[in-house]
Image: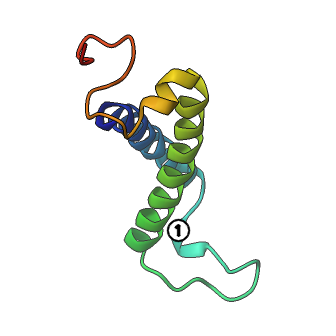
């Protein structure tokens, strides 16, 4: 389970970083406004940080759903039964 979690979060982290860089190469965080109204009023670092975390959460959720849907029914049912009980894996208990 920990390996699957890392396989989801690490690529999502890298992709969020690239997406954040691409978005703010085009947009100036000091000029952002709330739905066209008042300026946000946050520092550029705060805007970058919040945007990065939103991107990371969205990409991780999509990757987690993909990873979950790629598991077989036996693998899904094995979660929680034994610590290393993924059927077909090398470290599965006999």
Specify whether 29 is left or right of 33: left
Specify whether 24 is left or right of 85: right
Tally the marks: 1
Q: Which residue is found at the position 38% from the left and 69% from the top?
A: 45
Residue 71 in view of the camera: no
Q: Is residue 4 above or below residue 21?
A: above
Task: Indicate how the structure is coloured in the image.
Answer: rainbow
Q: Is residue 41 above or below residue 83?
A: below
- Furthest toward the bottom, the residue is 38
Crowdedness near tag 1: few (<14), some (14–19) or many (≥20) residues, C-alpha within 10 Å = some
Q: Which residue is found at the position 24% from the left and 18% from the top?
A: 93
Q: Position of residue 15 (x, y in %)?
A: 47, 38
Q: 60 or 67, which is in the foreground?
A: 67
Q: 31 or 2, which is in the foreground?
A: 2
Q: 25 or 21, which is in the foreground?
A: 21
Residue 46 in view of the camera: yes
Q: Position of residue 6 (x, y in %)?
A: 33, 36
Corner quadrant of residue 43: bottom left
Q: Which residue is found at the position 66% from the left and 78% from the top?
A: 33
Q: Position of residue 11 (x, y in %)?
A: 41, 34
**On the image, numbered disc 1 is attached to which residue?**
29
Corner quadrant of residue 2: top left
Q: 14 or 83, which is in the foreground?
A: 83
Q: Which residue is found at the position 47% from the left and 51% from the top?
A: 56
- Furthest toward the right, the residue is 36
Instruction: Quarter of the image for the N terminus: give it.
Output: top left
Instruction: Quarter of the image for the C terminus: give it.
Output: top left
Q: Secondary structure at mark 1?
A: helix
């Amino acid at each position: 389970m920990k390996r699957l979690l890392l396989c989801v979060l690490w690529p999502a982290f890298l992709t969020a970083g690239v997406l954040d860089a691409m978005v703010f190469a085009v947009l100036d965080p000091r000029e952002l406004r709330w739905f066209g109204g008042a300026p946000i009023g946050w520092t550029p670092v705060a805007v970058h940080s919040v945007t990065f975390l939103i991107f990371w959460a969205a990409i991780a959720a999509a990757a987690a759903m993909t990873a979950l849907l790629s598991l077989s029914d036996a693998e899904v049912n094995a979660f929680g039964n034994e610590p290393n009980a993924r059927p077909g894996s090398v470290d599965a208990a006999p």
